[in-house]
Amino acid sequence: MPLPRLVGGVLLVLGLLAGIAAPTLLQPEPALAAEQTPQDTVDVVEVVGVLDAPLTDFTIGALETAAEEGSEAVVIRLDTPGALGGDIDALVDAIDRSPVPVVVYVGPPGAQALGAGVRVAAAAHVLALAPATTFGVAVPQDLGDPDALDVAATAALLRDLAEDRGRDPAFADAAAAGDAVVAVPDGEAGTAVAEDADLGSEVDPDRVRTLDEPALVDAGIADVVEPTLQGVLSRLSDLEVETAAGPTPLDVDPVTANVRFVNANLLVRILHTAASPTLAYLLLLVGLLTLAFEIFQPGFGVAGFSAIGLLGLGVYSLVPLPFAPLWVVVAIVGLLLLAYDLAVAGLSWPTAVGTLLLGAGSWWMWAVPELAPPLWLVIVGTLSATFFFVIVMTTVLRAQGNTAQLGAEHVEGKVGVVRSVLNPEGHIFVGGALWRARAPEEAGRVKTGTRVRVLGLNDKLTLDVSPVDDEADVSH
């Protein structure tokens, strides 16, 4: 059975790789070297992608660690389309109560801070933008809930942050209403936005202004425009900002400072990567197909445990996303119909209806169209599932049946030894191999070490056996 072995082997390799990587989950961030002092250290925290729970929790933890170690500053490199289930209130509060100056750098060029990202950037003690970055359109505050925090409530939160940081509250109202700015190099304020510029699906190009650093500072929107992180660090000298500890001097020497990149551990990266509608769909689909593969195999092995892991991660990915439960059920019913047609060895209306239900459920299960996987992926996923049941699994089961039938003919009538309790199913060793076997109901629990005689192979590819009563029977 080369195909099942191949699939099982691939899944086993993935499991081994996960096992090898697991110890890194427990490794803490490296401590500062003995010759370095906390005052020389600038922590750089990468906050890229949707602001989900793993990413926001990680960022809050990085801010708390920087405060405990007395770092000179924390630079949050921000590039986000908004929040997706992350606790933005807690993150903004962590920035606000940080005794260490927090610099938010929306960069590199082409990055964006939209939705809840506007609040995170507005909370910074120093706000830096890279050229060609988009900053604004603060609603919705959560991509999974387009109604989360209306325009007035969002504007009020942004005005409070602007007043605390000495910026112009007028931009708070504009950003909450849907306006945005694009940072440009000095002297290019007022230029038209390029037609091919990637502003984000929520940004209306007609409501975007291009501002250079002097214009951004005069408008009270941002403090610095620099294309690189090194350029931002070079601007963080001879400054004084108001932190939770009061007026705090900020004097970073970009040449001598120990710039420490604070990276999320493997677990956080996996969970953050999983917070994607496309990945959630793939995890759930592949997990269900892997589970189906395992169900049609004798026993429960690597594929089954892999399916549990994939489904667990898929459900985790799906929870913060807005979805329609009814259409999820429709998709699952479609898969069940495909599995049913495979089980009865048919290729008729259940396969056709199952394919249609799986495709319809996969497409309409997403309550917010902007967060739905692309249509081409849904089509490919649906057709792949049908191919899996109609072609792959049919071939696998036919090969299993032929191989099992051939092997059973050689062991039929022979006596084997129970290796795991038959209750009524378990495993026996006979003919030099381990087989799944089933004892008759009237035999009760057949203990390990009991001798049993093979009666034949049933339709579940399991050997029917009967306990051997005495030694005389063994010789037959």
Image (spheres, rainbow, N blue to C red):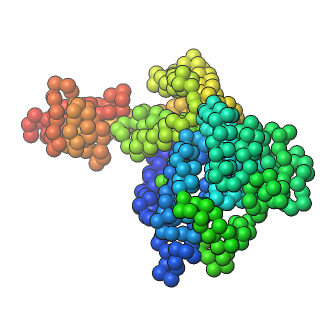
Locate the C terminus by quadrant.
top left
In the image, residue 56 sits, relative to residue 230, either above or below, namely: above
Outermost residue toward the bottom?
A: 35
Q: Is residue 101 visible?
A: no
In the image, residue 184 sits, relative to residue 281, either above or below, namely: below
Q: Residue at x 49, y 24 (%)?
A: 336
Q: Position of residue 184 (x, y in %)?
A: 83, 56
Q: Is residue 216 left or right of residue 275?
A: right
Q: Is residue 141 visible?
A: yes
173 and 59: which one is in front?
A: 173
Q: Position of residue 308 (x, y in %)?
A: 43, 40
Q: Residue at x 71, y 72 (%)?
A: 234
Q: Residue at x 61, y 55 (%)?
A: 47
How many marks do you count on the picture?
Answer: 0
221 and 244: which one is in front?
A: 244
Outermost residue toward the top?
A: 349
Q: Residue at x 63, y 42 (%)?
A: 157
Q: Is residue 103 left or right of residue 59?
A: right
